[in-house]
Structures are given as C-alpha cells and as structure tokens.
Image (spheres, rainbow, N blue to C red):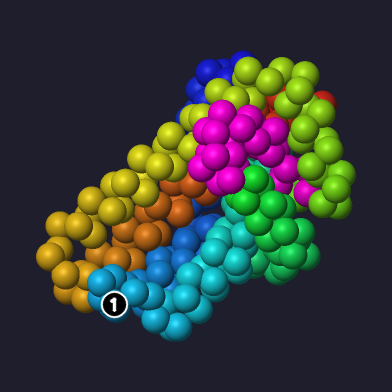
Amino acid sequence: MTLQAISKGFEHFKKDGLKFSLNIFPAVFLFGFVASMGTSSEISNGLSNFDIVILLINNFLIAPLITIISILNANDLFENRRRDVLVYYAIAWKFIIRILILSLISTFLIGVGLVLFVIPGIIFAGLFLLVNYFAILEEKNINESILLSWNKARENFINYLLMAAFFWFITILSISMVSYISSSFQEAEKIPTIVSIFSSSLAIYIQACLISFPILIFFKNQTSNQIK
C-alpha cells in the first residue's frame, strides 16, 4: 500500500506537477526569500533577534500556509476541479491556526520521542501522519483530526510507519543537501542571496511535493476517496 501510494504519487506529479508547482511558487519563493534574510549573521555570534523573528515567520506562518495551499491545490488537481490560484491563498487563512497548532503538537511529541528513546518518536510520526489532511480536507477540529489520524494509523500501523519514514528520510535528505550547498561557502555572510533563496525554496518545495502527492494519495486510500 505504501509503495503503491508512492508510485501513484510520482505518476500524478508527472501529470500535474507543472501546474502544481506554478500555483505554489509564490509561497515557496516567499519562504526562500524570508529565509535568506536571516542568513547574513555569523553563526558563531549566535542568532540575533532579527534571525529569531525570521525563523518564527517562516515556521509559524509561511510554512503552514504552504502546507495548506499545497494540499488543497493537489486535491483539486486529483479531482479535476479547477479554481483560480488566488482562491487557495485566500482560503488558506481559514486553516492557519488549526494547522499551526497541529504542527506544534506533532513536532513537539515527535521531537521529544526521538531525543529520549527514538522509537516513541517514530511511533508518533506514524500516528500524526494524517492530522493535517483531516483538518484541511474534511475540516475537522484539532481534537478530531488527532483522534481520526490515531485511529486510522492503529488499523494499519506498519504502512503508516513506512510512509512516515519515507517522508522524513526525503525531508532530512533535502535539508542535508541545503546544508551542503551552504557549507561550500567559508562564511555564512558570503553566501549569495540567490543561492540562499534557491536552497531554502528547494527544501520546502520538496516537502510540499511529498505531502501533496504520495502522502495525499495514501490519505485518500485510507478513506473513502480513493484515487484511481
């Protein structure tokens, strides 16, 4: 089931990837641009207040918006429903607080689990895999989204773990790639702005593609809205 979702995800990306990419490009570019504003300070001197503000804006505002816009956009492409791209950006604000809280809860539990015992973190990653999809596509509240994701995961836990592992492996790989690009410059303040924008945008774009294609298809296969 996991491999099938990944395979179908790549098939749909080949079909709709260009339109999807164009629709989310403004948000992805904004993420990269904002991230580049915080790369000028020397790491050895620690993060400045400005750097902290940049991190908060990107992680607590722009990243959740990209998640919402990507899932809504991909879902419409799967169902051959066409809407103006501005609609996604307009209605995304409806879900922003909900997705932000869910992201904070899941990230905290996964992070604590990984730091303390590793295995609990992996388990939480599987249990929280579908919370955003229930919140966005089925408009469930925070509590309902968590319970639905947990209950679904318990029915077929191995596949949820495998899909979560796939997501985190690719995510960590993309972040490592970004770090490698940045490390090729001897000093952080010497990284060209265009390189910083591109690397940060690429990392968040890869994550957007993962949640919008293989994992979205996995979600639909777990519910009554299977994609043919």
Residue 72: image x %, image y %?
A: 68, 50
Determine which residue is flagged by label 1.
45
Magenta stretch secondary structure, dominant:
helix
Closest to the observer, 181 or 9:
181
Can see residue 194?
A: no
Name the residue at 70% across, 33% down: 127
Can see residue 132?
A: yes
Quadrant of the snapshot with the C terminus: top right
Residue 24: image x %, image y %?
A: 53, 58
Is 136 on the left-hand or right-hand side of 22?
A: right
Is 56 on the left-hand or right-hand side of 157?
A: left
The magenta region covers: 110-135
Name the residue at 76% across, 35% down: 149
Residue 136: image x %, image y %?
A: 76, 50
State which quadrant residue 216 falls in. top right
Quadrant of the snapshot with the N terminus: top right
Name the residue at 66% across, 56% down: 104
